[in-house]
Image (spheres, coloured by chain):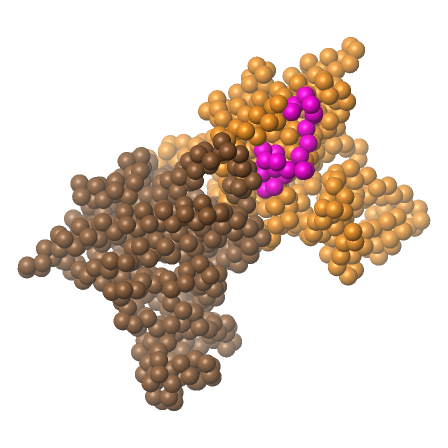
Chain colours: A brown, B orange
Amino acid sequence: MTLSTPAGYRPLDDASLRRFLADLPDLAAKLGGAPSDWSIVEVGDGNLNLVFLIDGPAGSLCVKQSLPYVRAAGESWPLPLDRAFFEQAYYRAVAPFTEGLTPRFHHYDPALYAIVMERLSPHIILRRGLIEGRRYPDAARAVAEFSARSTFATSDLGARIENKAEWMATFARNTALIRITAEVVFTDPLAESPRNRWTSPALDAIAAEFRSDSALKVTVAEWGRRFLTTSEALIHGDLHSGSVMVSETDTRVMDPEFAFVGPIGFDVGAFIANLAMNAIAQAGHAAEGDDRRAEAHWVLEQIPVFWNTWRARFLALWEEGGRGDAYPSGMFAKAGDTAPFAAAREAYVDRIFADAIGYAGVKTIRRILGFAHNADFELIADPLRRAPLEARALHLARRFLMEPQSFRRAEDVVAAVREG
Amino acid sequence: MTLSTPAGYRPLDDASLRRFLADLPDLAAKLGGAPSDWSIVEVGDGNLNLVFLIDGPAGSLCVKQSLPYVRAAGESWPLPLDRAFFEQAYYRAVAPFTEGLTPRFHHYDPALYAIVMERLSPHIILRRGLIEGRRYPDAARAVAEFSARSTFATSDLGARIENKAEWMATFARNTALIRITAEVVFTDPLAESPRNRWTSPALDAIAAEFRSDSALKVTVAEWGRRFLTTSEALIHGDLHSGSVMVSETDTRVMDPEFAFVGPIGFDVGAFIANLAMNAIAQAGHAAEGDDRRAEAHWVLEQIPVFWNTWRARFLALWEEGGRGDAYPSGMFAKAGDTAPFAAAREAYVDRIFADAIGYAGVKTIRRILGFAHNADFELIADPLRRAPLEARALHLARRFLMEPQSFRRAEDVVAAVREG
């Protein structure tokens, strides 16, 4: 199958990437030397894109380019190139609020659908680090700061109707990736789809059980409806531990190509779910003299670190003064309003947490019964070792969805994983 | 104050309107004769626009043109002209689903911000008819059909993500009118605003009481937040009885300039609130030998006619087959799914009703304590006769907002009005 692409687009290779960067004087200067001095390596291990790291005598860069298909599925699953447009639009929109928490954005080429940005070094993907049993003491806090600051500033609490309208109008058109989420996260995993897979035969019974659980499916469909109809803030749209780069001292959120004006809890829940899955998977990475109990414990503790940081930051930003059109301060100017308004703010973030729990359930199921699985489980080679851990995660996900009242605080999630 | 307007724009007058229509051969032919044969009258009694009725020997037309300010407030409150663009965009978007339920759309002039449409005759505004004690047996049913059909088709139940995205992108920019709603409906009436007015001194105490009721204000602010963050379907945005034209046998919904992709319950609640206010106001229009009891009773009974028609139509459309991405039918293909999926559809429309009750509360308060009042009450000349009826409506509105669990069905609204 040959995919048609716009005139001017070509997938970059070593030679064309050198020419592309050489034509951008500021960026070529960052690399230093001559184009022939640059070393280039393609490292895209995600599902969708080409990713090049370029090292020159003076510095380095990263180039991310859209491919016209889902890389993980091949050319049989075409995908519009314009997701690179939405990724750079997101970086630019949140830049004023997320200084130091994303890779620095340098340049966007609309014909090549290519983004040039800071190359992070010696960072690795958080998920990989956690699987290896490493600890990143600042990661959960930094991701929480990133999410709370960017969503507050782009919500109706922090932004004016007119500013939010521009983000709504721009990102509403990110339909290709919104459709992918709708289908592979909310629909397929509990339906029959050729894109689904799971650890078989060990999980055949539970997969069948989930797909016959009408109440569970109605609940997931209701979260899917909310996903499509909640325009709360500009969200990242794919905020799992594979979208975070870390070093011992630095944390950056990347890969916001799924961004749109959506439910804040979707991002919060994604990060919580992926921490929980990693913690559950730790036992599968145990080896002689390395039982991973302490690591699992540590990862799990990052869930309250993440949520409590998020909650405190979001509330602090709101108290410092919402400039948006929701909960306008002029309505709460009387002395007697102070405590009820504070309670309303608490209720707001509690509701975000409740949303996060629902989305965490959905996101967990999709990683085990759906199309795109997590390295946390996938790198457990032995299916007989992997399957019981995946089953534990599925059990937790079902509790998230069907017993939401059991999860009022992040500490409740920690307790549930320990019990499970 | 002189308002700057785009080149090419001028408010139409008798002479320029004749030239404008003469230059549109199809429409001039509808009128027939020569331009000098046409009779023109300006009838805009709304808050925002010029409205001309043009009668020719062969037929008639209506032309609605934006003014660059809020007509009801004067040039001191400027307003972008582009609301005419959103009005015609809405008519075109919902036309496939609302045949016979709106005025026929003929032409839009983007430079003049002028819409040419069918002149409805002998129709009058539903609100005026109800105030005069007339009955329109088909009106509530027709408005319900209009709302259920247009919102289902433009929701994630009836539309694909890609289609809804276009409406999201287009109508997100209707910020001038979205801001008016946010301010004059949700914010001002329970805050201090020079735009507010109420029947004074009779309602001074209750106005002060409402503005000191922190719990009520938090509830209204929460509905305001939901209004700004719920992208459920393309809604009319101002679906009160003043936006409906009726004859004995025909009903048309007009004036959709506030349209955007918003909460379905906002339209449903607006219509319910305005019926309830009219029913409460009937006693104020009583005269010797005309106590208006039967009329009040009849208007009140239209609330269940409206809601039960809406509910049945929306559910029927969904059962006939949702083509959207929410609640995808592929998730509910197993035999055991039938009853739970049907229950989910019922829960969905029950939730719309609950939303409608909340918005009905907000919309009632704003008509009595805010900027734009209703003719239903305003035409009761004697403030001592008007105020107790307005107070009854305020009491009902507070019940809608603070005792939502008392309103599960439309019949509960009827009972509450009767008790009040």
Q: Residue furthest left?
A: A288
User: In this orientation, which residue lies closer to the viewer: B314 or A275?
Assistant: A275
- Residue B195 part of the magenta-drawn span: yes
Please provide the residue range marked out in magenta. B182-204
Residue beneath the point at 70% across and 49% down: B79
Note whether residue B160 is visible: no
Snapshot quadrant of residue B196: top right
Q: Which residue lies furthest to the right in this view?
A: B36
Residue beneath the point at 29% across and 72% down: A121
Residue beneath the point at 74% across and 41% down: B73
Note whether residue A144 is visible: yes
- Figure disc tally: 0
Residue B336 against residue B17 in the figure, above or below: above
Residue A418 against residue A283 in the figure, above or below: above
User: In this orientation, which residue lies closer to the viewer: A172 or B138?
Assistant: A172
Q: In the image, residue B346 lies at what x, y percent?
A: 45, 31
- Residue B190 part of the magenta-drawn span: yes
Looking at the image, residue B247 sits to the left or right of residue B369; the answer is: right
Looking at the image, residue A133 sits to the left or right of residue A326; the answer is: left
Residue beneath the point at 36% across and 47% down: A312
Q: Residue furthest front?
A: A335
Q: Quadrant of the C terminus of chain A?
A: top left
Q: In the image, residue B227 lies at what x, y percent?
A: 54, 41
Residue B406 against residue B242 in the figure, above or below: above
Snapshot quadrant of residue A344: top left
Residue B63 against residue B148 in the figure, above or below: below
Q: Quadrant of the N terminus of chain A?
A: bottom left
Q: In the image, residue A263 lies at what x, y percent?
A: 43, 48
User: In this orientation, which residue lies closer to the viewer: A12 or A415?
Assistant: A415
Looking at the image, residue B406 sits to the left or right of residue B21; the answer is: left
Q: In the image, residue A268 lies at what x, y percent?
A: 35, 50
